[in-house]
Amino acid sequence: MENSNVKYKKIYSDLIQKRFPEKVQLLETFMHKNELSPLDVITLNQKIFDAPQKENFDINQKFKSYNPEMIYKILNYQKTHQLNNSQLAKHFNLSRNTVTAWKKKYQVK
């Protein structure tokens, strides 16, 4: 499910090897996958870059967008991990209102 022909696995493999070799073991489960999903990319970013700088985080939040497949995966994650809307929103750095709107739009209970 490579998104727009972007080779996320290659990009992250190179990034980890060259700039963060100390994190190779921490992230090796991701590097053994054939392809990285959007959720994998989010998780990798969190693990590689730890806590983002506040100003960069705020800017990046404004430009986030999710396709329906990704939204279903996020909402499925909520069910699987038995999270409420606030917990899910915090985990994925979303607004609770966004989660509620998605559940209404995609008719997920």
Image (cartoon, grey):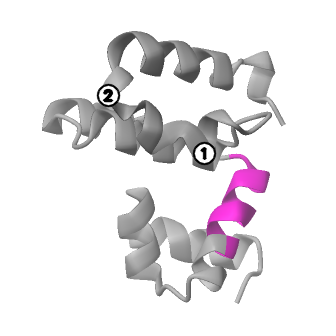
Residue type indicated by callout 2:
Glu
Instruction: State how many labels appear.
Output: 2
Q: State the predominant SS element of the stretch in magenta.
A: helix
Residue hosting label 2? 22
Identify the amino acid type marked 1: Thr
Q: CA distance from mark 2 to mark 1?
A: 15 Å
- Few, some or many C-alpha atoms within 10 Å of disc 2 (few <14, some 14-19, many ≥20)? few
Q: Quadrant of residue 87?
A: bottom left
- Mark 1 neighbour density, 10 Å: few (under 14) some (14–19) many (20 or more): few
Q: Camera-side residue: 84 or 81?
A: 81
Q: Which segment is the magenta one? A: 67-76
Q: Where on the picture, by quarter, is residue 82?
A: bottom right
Residue 12 is situated, as x and y percent measured from the top left of the image, at: 54, 22
Q: Position of residue 25 (x, y in %)?
A: 45, 38
Q: Name the quarter where the N terminus is drawn.
A: top right
Query: What residue is shown with label 1?
Result: 29
Residue found at x 48% / y 47%? 43
Dot 2 or dot 1: first in sequence order is 2
